[in-house]
Image: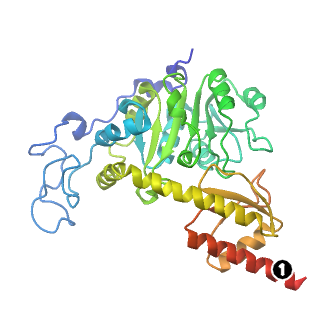
Amino acid sequence: MFDLNTILRPHIITLTPYSSARDEYTGKEGIFLDANENAFGSTLDGSTLAGSTLDGSASEEHYNRYPDPHQLAIKAKLAPIKGVRPTQIFIGNGSDEPIDLLVRATCTPGSDSILILPPTYGMYEVSAAINDVQLIKVPLTPDFQIDVPAVLAAILPHTKLLFVCSPNNPTGNLIDREAIITLLTHFNGLVVVDEAYIDFADTESFTALLDQYPNLVVLQTFSKAWGLAALRSGMCFASEALIEVLNKIKPPYNVSGPTQQLLLKALNQLPTKDAMVAQILAQREELIAKLLNLPLVRHVYPSDANFILVKFDDPKAVFDYLIDQQIIVRDRHRVKLCEGCLRITVGTPSENEQVLAMLKTYANRLTTTV
């Protein structure tokens, strides 16, 4: 039976969190003289006293008041969309914040370890390095799936976290669901399923299993399908007990007021998000089909994300040529199992056509110089 307290750092369990002014008084109306704010407004307000309300109804031009430290309005609106309870949601400064908080909450520096499955998202390794936590790497199989026996064999007594990115970055594919469930069943630590690209995949989110597996953590983001990368806002879904821990150790006001107001607006635009996803999926399939017709393309990997992993004979030369044409893709050819590959994000129809045109031009140049 999984017990969260057995993997938390002991001092985290007994930690008394910082109590902000907005924790001590949760009302929305009144004369607020408790947080040492500037009662006269802000340099951006333009004139007189700013409003006193603290919820999303206040004018967006009023920046002098601290925001809700727990983003309760966002969680209330997000919960039914994701099929979870508001108390199972943590909102962070991007998904990178909960990644770092999970490491800090569970891993004693110089003693504990986390396990990752390369090739994968690079911030797991960076967070481990920043926190002086041992990193265990078990590569995916050549078809980009989990080598379950190898993972289970690599787990150490002090391994606290196991990160699984699905759909995976940079390979683009979904990780086998049953393999992840096997890890949830046999690993007595937290299994963190990073679903940054889940909106582009034809599958159910692991959030549906939160109540079944207390050691499951699911990460998602507003950066991709919602088109809100500039807001730096991510979602973490987990047991109420773990969410309480993350709230205890996060900075008091980790999500800004303007970001919260914009997220509330975005959550009212679910059909717009779904329409954009549909366009991206259509463009993804068209781009894959056209890439496969190019002679310099050696392989196009199946994608469940909003990007495509493409293999070339000389990826560095192709990358440099595209850069010269001010077309920026991601060079992944030095990444294990991604040798020879560039990662290409699905763009607008016009952008995709420009990429294809430049690749055709490059191929023609190769032909004429041979």
Q: Nearer the viewer, residue 68 or 351?
A: 351
Q: Residue at x 62, y 42 (%)?
A: 166
> In which quadrant will I find the N terminus?
top right
For label 1, the SS is: helix
Q: Position of residue 265 (x, y in %)?
A: 31, 53
Identify the residue position indicated by label 1 in the image. Answer: 366
Q: How many marks?
A: 1
Left or right side of 2 for 365: right
Q: Residue at x 42, y 50 (%)?
A: 233
| Figure coloring | rainbow
Q: Position of residue 20 (x, y in %)?
A: 26, 39
Q: Residue at x 12, y 59 (%)?
A: 40
The answer to whether residue 343 shows anywhere in this view is no
> In which quadrant will I find the C terminus?
bottom right
The amino acid on which the numbered mark 1 sits, given as a three-letter code, is Leu
The answer to whether residue 37 shows anywhere in this view is yes
